[in-house]
Amino acid sequence: MKPIRLIAFTAFTAIALVQSARADTPLPSWNDGPAKQGIINFVEKVTKAGSPDFVPVAERIATFDNDGTLWCEQPLPVQFYFAIDRMKALAPQHPEWKDKEPFASLLKGDLKTALAGGDHALLELVMATHAGMTTAEFEQIVKDWIATAKHPKYKKPYTECVYQPMVELLAYLRENGFKTFIVSGGGIEFIRPWAEQVYGIPPEQVVGSSIKTKFEMCDGKPVLVRLSELNFIDDKAGKPVGINQHIGRQPIAAFGNSDGDQQMLEWTGAGSAARLMMLVHHDDAEREYAYGPAGGLPDTKVGTFSQSLMDEAVKRGWTVTSMKKDWKRIFPSDK
Amino acid sequence: MKPIRLIAFTAFTAIALVQSARADTPLPSWNDGPAKQGIINFVEKVTKAGSPDFVPVAERIATFDNDGTLWCEQPLPVQFYFAIDRMKALAPQHPEWKDKEPFASLLKGDLKTALAGGDHALLELVMATHAGMTTAEFEQIVKDWIATAKHPKYKKPYTECVYQPMVELLAYLRENGFKTFIVSGGGIEFIRPWAEQVYGIPPEQVVGSSIKTKFEMCDGKPVLVRLSELNFIDDKAGKPVGINQHIGRQPIAAFGNSDGDQQMLEWTGAGSAARLMMLVHHDDAEREYAYGPAGGLPDTKVGTFSQSLMDEAVKRGWTVTSMKKDWKRIFPSDK
């Protein structure tokens, strides 16, 4: 073979190999099976020009729950650990907390008594730790905390307790022209400071729960002050409301893992065009956690996956992904 | 010259001409002057790699007020005409409106008496015409109306009463990696159905005032019902709040035209990096309207540009664009 032809041949082969490798390996941390194949089939049909299921790029909206869908939510949601750490840091300025629930119990490490106060106790904790500063100050507090705090079981930063298969799914969808959004019951300002780096999702594509803020001039400099007042709960029937407020069009793909995501998946499925709705089922006690009464797993208050959600998934043809069977690895550091 | 060299030369020249034409003519409907030059200087310095003012693409956020900044808001804001037309269409189903303000006066064409009811009257009108249907139904109502309604003075569709220089500015910023957002006191769901086609701004980049919605199952099909309850007023001090809720970062450029935009421009100017804040001044009675006490123009309740806004603009170094002097043409159909 003449040198020039050899070079051309080599170049051609190299390109073919790269293309083949790319085509063969989307979602490398997913095991071959119906869940992975369902994702790929869906993406191929909505992106293929001329296909009856083709969806223009502008309408390729995908929404993801965060806790339990993109990162670990057990034994307690990450934001709860943030609130406790924050409360401990603020405790010296609040001697009255020693006699006031839920702070008194939390300071003693008695989570059970603290949580017995239910939603009211939780709200007290959130307001004491998430309000009273500017948005810029809160952003820095979250950044500082997430850079150092570690998961109680895995002993690594929470940002490394994200699900590698889902991070790959986010990237795969974006490579195919999708805009990916987080739609979380968690706090919007708790997620934004790190979501771009960890998930590739910019602040303007995060939808979440929020408290009210107030615009003020502080020594001639404008600030937004975080108030002790709920603004929006982005959970259950609130998720379609939040999606409509922030995005203004229906997603064509939605991913969740618990009862809090049911309405988001229903709303996503309401259109007539091709749609993908998927629930992540935590059934891997060995590598992560196994919970949710569906499938006979132990019930949990956090991230409940109820039998009625499973019934709805079956009825509406949603994919239920088994972490145990469908995922080759769970966390980025897994081999 | 040999043919092949001629072709190469011609191709090269053609490319050079196109490049030169493109480089020479951003903002063709702007007259040369400090306003146009200020925009170009700003864009060049924030996009030039290695420049001390360089801003990464992800942070190039620009926010635009809508009424009076992107399209005509006189003699009354467009959404007000929509509400009146909608009320007339609904009147046969509401015989009680004949004796109830503001409807009775509006049905008689007596705008002055109707508006004497102030904010309360306006709210009554909005709720009677904007609530009680699903989001999908409302979207269709807006689309149908905007396709046929005409501006009372210009006798052309409202979507042709947009400002050509601002449409060019939106495109110019996007060509330079900016994400452009509308941040309007008007209704978010009134703007979204046509903003993509008219301004190139997708629904997820529209921030506006809103009423509450509720997720419901209607014969097994999920819908969002629009409720007669205010959710958010995206005006004055509400604009920075809305920007933070939806976008989650500070814009580096903001464009407005009235007192309702002051806080948005203040908030945009709060950062330390390069910033552009601009107010459109309606001082062209011949081609459009002249209003706002600043500059000795007649006062208006709609789109007030007060002396105190002008003072703030001078104090903070905001650009005040004169429609009369800085704009070669106003509307797309102008020569």
Image (spheres, coloured by chain):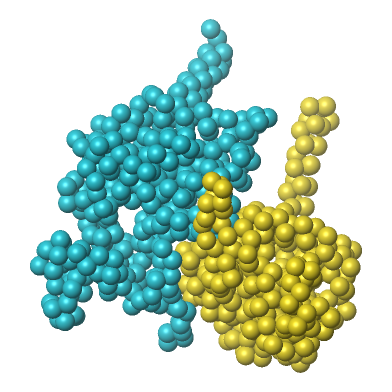
Chain colours: A yellow, B cyan
User: Residue B153: horizontal and vertical position, in percent?
Assistant: 17, 47
The quadrant of the picture occupied by the C terminus of chain A is: bottom right
Relative to B82, residue A291 above or below: below
- The residue that appears at 42% across and 84% down in the rendered structure is B218
Relative to B326, residue A316 above or below: below
Asked whether, in this view, residue A31 is left or right of residue B36, the answer is right
The quarter holding residue A322 reads bottom right
The quarter holding residue B283 reads top left
Single out the residue that lies furthest toward the front: A95
- The residue that appears at 54% across and 63% down in the rendered structure is A213
- The residue that appears at 80% across and 31% down in the rendered structure is A7
Asked whether, in this view, residue B39 is left or right of residue B335, the answer is right
Residue A123, visible in the rendered structure: yes
The quarter holding residue A320 reads bottom right
Asked whether, in this view, residue A46 is left or right of residue B103, the answer is right
Identify which residue, A13 or B116, lies in the foreground. B116
User: Residue B257: horizontal and vertical position, in percent?
Assistant: 36, 44
Asked whether, in this view, residue B142 is left or right of residue A166, the answer is left
Identify which residue, A15 or B156, lies in the foreground. B156
User: Residue A275: horizontal and vertical position, in percent?
Assistant: 55, 70
- The residue that appears at 23% across and 54% down in the rendered structure is B76
Identify which residue, A225 or B44, lies in the foreground. A225
Relative to B297, residue A259 above or below: below
Residue A239, visible in the rendered structure: no
- How many numbered marks appear? 0
User: Residue B209: horizontal and vertical position, in percent?
Assistant: 40, 62
The quadrant of the picture occupied by the N terminus of chain A is: top right
